[in-house]
Amino acid sequence: MPTALIADDEEAPRAQLLLALRAAWPELDVVASCVNGVDAWDAYLEHEPQVCVLDVRMPGLTGIQVAQRINGRAQIVFVTAYGDHALAAFDAGAVDYVLKPVDAARLSQALERVKARLAAPAVATATASDLQQLLNQLAGQVRKPAPLEVLQAGVGKEVRLVRVDDVVYFESDTRYTRVVYTDADGDGEVLIRTPLKELLAQLDPTRFWQVHRSVIVAHRHIASALRIDEGNMVLTLRGRAERLPVSRHFQGQFKGQ
Amino acid sequence: MERDAFIFGARGAGLWIGTVCGLAGTTYGIAAAPSRVTPWLAFVIAALLFAGIWKLGLSVWLRPERFTARRLWRGGLLMMLATYVGALASFSRDLGALMASGSPWYEAALQVAWRATPLQLMLGVAGLVLVSLISAARHEYLQRALKQVHAERERDAVARQLTEARLTLLQAQIQPHFLFNTLAALQHWVDVGDARAAPLLRSLTSFLRGSTELMLKPEVTLAEECAMVAHYLAIMQTRLGDRLRWRVDMAPECATQLLPSGLVITLVENAVEHGIEPQLRGGEVRLVARIEGATFELRVLDDGAGLPPGDVRDGVGLANSRERLRHQFGARAELQLSPRDDGPGAQACLRVHAPDRPS
């Protein structure tokens, strides 16, 4: 049974989309219903569904940024309201999208194309690279907030300030995010409350790479990527003993040149 | 050369009649003089003379800027020279008689020229003065007309800009994205019988009706505008749920302040769209209006992501608002978008100074 993820930051359109999907494609198993971009990306990494139906305008990460990260590994259908700037590009790039309020006939059409691509992976790969190009272009137009500069961590009665520049890696730890850093005073470690998935949207992607659903690493600290077997890869760090797991989705970025 | 309204109009008729009479008179004069000139030749001479005068007159009339002082002097000298040659020709019988009396030709020529000089000087000076007077008067007249045309064109441009600004505002106000997202929520809640549908529809109707009415007036009171803002915020509140919180603090004496219609709502929409909606946990929009001394101050604050780094370029709404403020208040109004100084987020600050005590 094919699996799907849906994301919309507003309650009513999200609920409507869910109902419309159930009516148009009863066999589709909606495994996650997300309320913003960072949730959608996290849920994607958790479930790796085949279909993602994403609202374009969402807080945290836009639908376009989420699709860009998914990088062709799932079939994308965008949902947006008339008047969105991306519509012209979607039309030009033959991107599947439906307009809000979601119309049953339009949704069925888009889903038929998704089914066709799921049935013929060769065609899907070709469209995916076109889509990726378009998404990179559109993501460049997104107004991004300034990247996070400093983290504040409560340690007992003290609030410790850690410069993002000093961070080696972030690791999510049930309810907290563990921040491992190294500065002039040596190595350190603090816990912060901000979930890893939210931190991700605030970090400079050219300096911090996500390598696992629960790990983000500053790439200047990476020494090497080691392939253990078919599905497993780990990172070794410069001057440090710990090894960080690289999940399947991210293994593609370590492929040698 | 374009057709001049005066020369070719009813008032120019005198000029034409005068020309015809002058032509007839001169022809008669030349023909009647004790010379061997036939009436036809006299007519041709008179016609050439008048053609010259007309050509000169037309040039002065239509292109007065050509007659600079230097050109006038040069033209004057040329004219005097030409008339001397003409004088020598017309006094040729006297010249012949003088030469026959035994004086050498140059002396005879000098004598003839001397005899003609007062007439030449008079003609030349009179011609120069006439030409320079006409050209100066025409020059000034044309300059004034040109200035008037420019002023009218500018007035037209301002009027057009204002109309465009209001149209853009109407469009910006009822953004398709806003409208269809609201309709999407409405559609769903109607489908499933959710109780939120009815109040949302009511707010949307009030907002749309208000927007349409707002467009018909160039300016509104802050109280009227705030009623619209409340409808807008109620809609967004229903859609976003607890992600949006809002507060309006309006000092009672601000209620009657006149502002360009749709300005406050543009600022509030910006705060919701760029400040609150991109935040994972939403935020609060505050509208504060007060009067301090002679200055009306309105601030729209949000506690969202703040302004993007680097130069902030005005969007359509903000550029439009500035243009309309400038038109209504001139230099008395200022609108600034800046990071909030008391925490995260952005603030739009509008100040209007009273006209009698500009600060």
Image (spheres, rainbow, N blue to C red):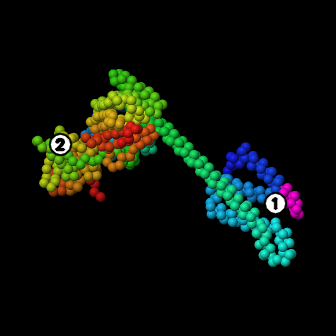
Please identify the quadrant where the N terminus of chain A is shown.
Answer: top left
Q: Is residue B223 visible?
A: yes
Residue bearing mark 2: A192
Instruction: Please count the marks in the image.
Output: 2
In the foreground, A91 or B285: B285
Q: Disc 1 on helix, strand or loop?
A: helix
Q: Report the mark closest to the observer, 1 or 2.
A: 1
User: Would you place residue B127 above or below residue A175 in this image?
Assistant: below
Whether residues under marks 1 and 2 lie with C-beta atoms below 8 angstroms apart, the answer is no
Image spot of residue A239 (x, y percent): 15, 57
In the foreground, B140 or A114: B140
Which contiguous range is marked in magenta? B27-45
Q: Is B34 within the magenta?
A: yes
Q: Disc 2 on helix, strand or loop?
A: strand
Give the CA separation, mark 1 to mark 2.
108 Å
Q: Which residue is drawn at the image coordinates 47% and 31% (left, top)? A: B217
Residue bearing mark 1: B45
Amino acid identity at mark 1? Ile
Q: Is A153 within the magenta?
A: no
Image spot of residue B353 (x, y percent): 37, 39
In the image as oriented, which residue stretches furthest toward the left?
A156
In the foreground, B12 or B35: B35
User: Would you place residue A75 above or below residue B311 in this image?
Assistant: above
Image spot of residue B135 (x, y percent): 65, 55
Q: Which residue is drawn at the image coordinates 63% and 52% (left, top)? A: B137
Q: Main secondary structure of the magenta part?
A: helix
Dot 1 surroundings within 10 Å: few (below 14), some, or many (20 or more)? some
Q: Which residue is drawn at the image coordinates 17% and 38% (left, top)? A: A175
